[in-house]
């Protein structure tokens, strides 16, 4: 008999039970505001789960397939916070756009549960189950606005390409199992102990595994779904896609290559180096010609994934620490920027064109200031938090003698600064063709304000984040 320590999975068990309870409440509720009620319950559930994560002990359970440690705990806190904020921003939007159905927060909660399982996966099978539990709700959320052709197209593209990536991932997992005799990360590491180079079959398995994970983080050349899905999906769903799932997928990426294959860096560092460089370059240049702000943010996210992967390519505790710092800062920047995008309305219709930002500083000075802070930070301009995120990953790359990758990253940042600064120019130096309507909903104002304060304040009080990310990173290196 194998004994299981269910206490280590308390947050996940709580989330699963709560998601089923939310579904039942939505089904049997007679209230016209059932969706709003379930959304607020979902936010409370996510916050309770966040507290449970901080109280859960470290350990391994379920026959070694599930692990809780400082690394997974840090990632789960970001995932739950990002999901809660995304759910909060969606409430009023869904009511205005006649897509106010209680299934929306339930799907977001189940997706967050999948993400939590992803970052705690200590086995290839657990990894796949977590990915699919996250992905299936996301496919539905992308096409949630059923009367929109764009949303339906976005959901279909995401589903088809997601199925392809899952097939690649499974093929890689089967190759790795065939050549190591184990699906557990610890078992794979033990089978490869003492080997300096991997056999060709194992290399093929690592390549397919990496390709499947690269799709989940939308890294080049597996990025093709990102712009269309970001543009076509409802804006709160886009904000969700750009925050919590990115954190979960990158955290899984880090664990899945460092723990089982940490002794075979030469077999996978070149792959990470290449997709990181390509992502930074494409994200910088492809966004220049965009006129839709959601497509621009899609290419921006591709570029930022490239910057984060620079730290993974370093394959050191400092590199992983840089990735975790980058993810925390990127989560705040992105949610703040999407709160501003959600707040832009003309009459009863949301607006997404860059031209609609013209003259925003005259009509909505507070929103323009917040959006400027986020754009400056995304560009990596000091003293805002985005600069420190890039500083940590580039410093780790230089310490690992990845000089060319660091130079590519710096040059891509310079190019990318153009389209971020263009947004600031439109807001402050161009005249509005037609003023935007008032910002609807205090929730969006609160999200913008808190995010802006965090981005500005990081340079003053970075110690908590730096200390926690270092202890989380060191877990993966024993």
Image (spheres, grey):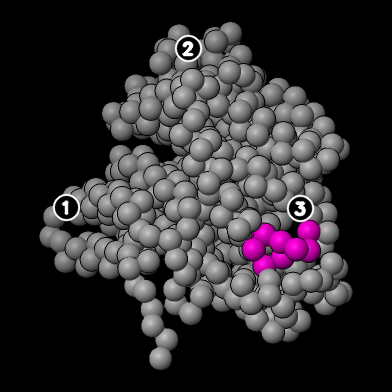
Q: Between disc 2 and disc 1, whose residue precedes?
A: 1
Which element carries disc 3, helix, strand or loop? Answer: helix
Dominant secondary structure of the residues highlighted in magenta in the image: helix
Mark 2, residue position = 361
Give the quarter of the image for residue 185: bottom right
Residue on which disc 3 sits: 272
Which image quarter: residue 105?
A: bottom left
Q: Which of marks 1 and 3 is nearer the N terminus?
A: 1
Can you tell which of label 2 and label 1 is closer to the viewer?
2
For label 1, the residue is 32
SS label for mark 2 = helix
3 or 2: mark nearer the eye: 3
Q: How crowded is mark 2: few (under 14 residues within 10 Å), some or many (20 or more)?
A: many
Q: Which mark is residue 384?
A: none
Report whether 468 appears left or right of 473.
left
> Residue 13 at what x, y percent from top left?
33, 68
* SS at circle 1: loop
Instruction: Say which label, 3 or 2, has the lower sequence index.
Output: 3
* Residue plotted at (20% across, 51% down): 37
Task: Tell me the magenta residue range.
Answer: 258-265
Residue nearest the viewer, comparing 280 with 264: 264
Q: Position of residue 122 (x, y in %)?
A: 55, 69
Front residue of this view, candidates 418 and 67: 67
* Viewport quadrant of the N terminus: bottom left
Residue 280 picture location, percent across and down:
74, 39
Q: Residues within 10 Å of mark 3 (few under 14, many from 20)?
A: many
Q: Residue at x 49, y 42 (%)?
A: 468
């Amino acid at each position: 008999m194998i004994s299981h320590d269910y206490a280590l999975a308390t947050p996940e068990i709580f989330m699963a039970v709560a998601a089923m309870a939310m579904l039942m409440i939505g089904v049997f509720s007679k209230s016209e505001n059932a969706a709003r009620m379930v959304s607020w319950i979902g936010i409370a559930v996510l916050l309770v789960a966040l507290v449970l994560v901080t109280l859960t002990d470290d350990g391994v359970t379920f026959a070694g397939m599930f692990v809780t440690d400082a690394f997974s705990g840090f990632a789960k806190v970001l995932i739950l916070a990002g999901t809660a904020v995304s759910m909060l921003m969606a409430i009023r939007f869904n009511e205005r756009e006649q897509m106010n159905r209680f299934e929306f927060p339930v799907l977001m909660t189940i997706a967050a549960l999948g993400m939590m399982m992803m970052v705690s996966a200590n086995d290839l099978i657990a990894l796949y189950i977590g990915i699919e539990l996250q992905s299936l709700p996301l496919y539905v959320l992308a096409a949630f606005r059923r009367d929109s052709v764009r949303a339906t197209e976005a959901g279909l593209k995401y589903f088809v390409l997601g199925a392809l990536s899952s097939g690649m991932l499974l093929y890689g997992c089967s190759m790795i199992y065939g050549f190591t005799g184990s699906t557990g990360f610890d078992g794979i590491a033990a089978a490869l102990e003492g080997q300096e180079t991997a056999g060709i079959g194992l290399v093929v398995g690592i390549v397919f595994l990496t390709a499947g994970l690269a799709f989940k983080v939308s890294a080049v050349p597996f990025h093709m779904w990102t712009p269309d899905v970001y543009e076509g999906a409802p804006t709160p769903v886009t904000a969700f896609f750009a925050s919590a799932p990115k954190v979960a997928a990158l955290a899984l990426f880090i664990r899945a290559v460092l723990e089982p294959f940490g002794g075979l860096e030469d077999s996978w560092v070149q792959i990470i180096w290449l997709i990181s460089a390509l992502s930074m370059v494409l994200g910088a240049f492809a966004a220049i010609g965009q006129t839709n702000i959601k497509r621009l943010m899609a290419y921006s996210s591709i570029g930022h994934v490239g910057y984060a992967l620079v730290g993974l390519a370093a394959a050191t505790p400092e590199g992983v620490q840089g990735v975790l710092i980058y993810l925390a800062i990127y989560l705040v920047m992105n949610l703040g920027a999407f709160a501003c995008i959600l707040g832009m309305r003309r009459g009863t219709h949301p607006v997404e064109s860059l031209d609609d930002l013209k003259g925003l500083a005259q009509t909505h000075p507070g929103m323009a200031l917040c959006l400027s802070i986020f754009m400056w930070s995304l560009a990596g301009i000091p003293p805002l938090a985005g600069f420190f995120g890039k500083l940590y990953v580039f410093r780790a790359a230089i310490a690992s003698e990845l000089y060319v990758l660091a130079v590519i990253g710096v040059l891509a940042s310079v190019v990318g600064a153009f389209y971020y600064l263009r947004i600031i120019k439109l807001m402050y130096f161009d005249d509005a063709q037609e003023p935007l309507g008032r910002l609807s909903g205090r929730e969006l104002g609160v999200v913008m304000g808190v995010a802006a304060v965090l981005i500005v304040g990081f340079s003053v009080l970075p110690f908590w984040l730096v200390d926690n990310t270092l202890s989380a990173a060191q877990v993966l290196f024993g």
